[in-house]
Image (cartoon, grey):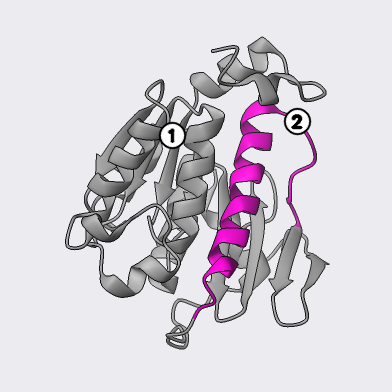
Amino acid sequence: MKERYARNLSLPGWTPETQQRLAQAKVLVVGAGGLGSAVLLYLAAAGVGCIGIADGDRVEPSDLQRQIIYDTDDLGKAKADAAARRLRALNPQIEATVHRTRLEAENAVRLIDDCDLVLDCTDNLGARVLLSRTCLQLSRPWVHGAVSEYYGHVTTLLPSGPCWHCLFGTQTAGNPTPPGILGPVPGTIGCVQAAEALKYLTGIGRLLVGRLLVWDAVPAAWDEFTYTKNPDCPACRTEKV
């Protein structure tokens, strides 16, 4: 373990006990596409002990432009299976749990309840609203990431902090996602999500709680916006007891 995680253990504040906390952690990654590819690879490489992969899709040719966890031989295969095989090959010390399904009302509580942290790598608003509601219900933290064309953003949501609806309102429907996406954008945002997850699980650093970090690749600019808990938010005011 010492050699594999030597670069982790050389970080300020990162001890063998810190690494052991990662080894004991359970996370769920919802969506194994462009965002999920970067998230899954970096969490496995860092030594997160149990990584759940929830995705009901199969690998298509157009995915390979940005979903770097897959290769041409994976075409037609279930994404959750192909991603799990890649993670096990990268780091045999971790466990990759396969859920060949999308996040739905019938399975959300079961998938999330056993996890320490959830990472939102979905690509549709309905699943994100369900994820927000379930994490509030179960008091689970989650890292939200989203991308479109040349743009992406990240924030971290804790049970005690402002929720996703405090930031975005109570909308449950939105405009269709544009079909185009610059390949490195989900990779960049996914890397930030992975960093947030590792910081949360180890207790190192300041999280993006109450802060939305935005990347726009065209001007090559990062922006940060702050937001606070809405005392009248119908989601977090009613979901938590």
Amino acid carrying mark 2 in the image = Ile
Kindly identify the amino acid type of the residue bearing the numbered disc 1. Answer: Cys
Q: Is residue 7 left or right of residue 12?
A: left
Q: Which of the pair 77/30 is nearer the observer?
A: 77
Which is more toward the observer, 163 or 39? 39
Q: Residue at x 52, y 37 (%)?
A: 43
Depth order, front residue of 200/92: 92
Is 180 displayed left or right of 88 in the figure?
right
For disc 1, the marked residue is 115
Q: Secondary structure at mark 2?
A: loop
Mark 1: few/some/many CA within 10 Å (<14, 14-19, 20+): some
The correct choice, above or below, for 233 with respect to 46 in the image is below
Quadrant in the picture for residue 160: top right
Give above or below for 89 relative to 181. above
Evaluate whether residue 136 shows in this view: no
- Image coordinates for residue 20, horizontal then vertical, percent: 57, 15
Q: Nearer the viewer, mark 1 or mark 2?
A: 2
| Magenta region includes residue 192 | yes
Residue at screen point 60% across, 21% down: 5
Q: Secondary structure at mark 1?
A: loop
Mark 2 sits on what residue? 204
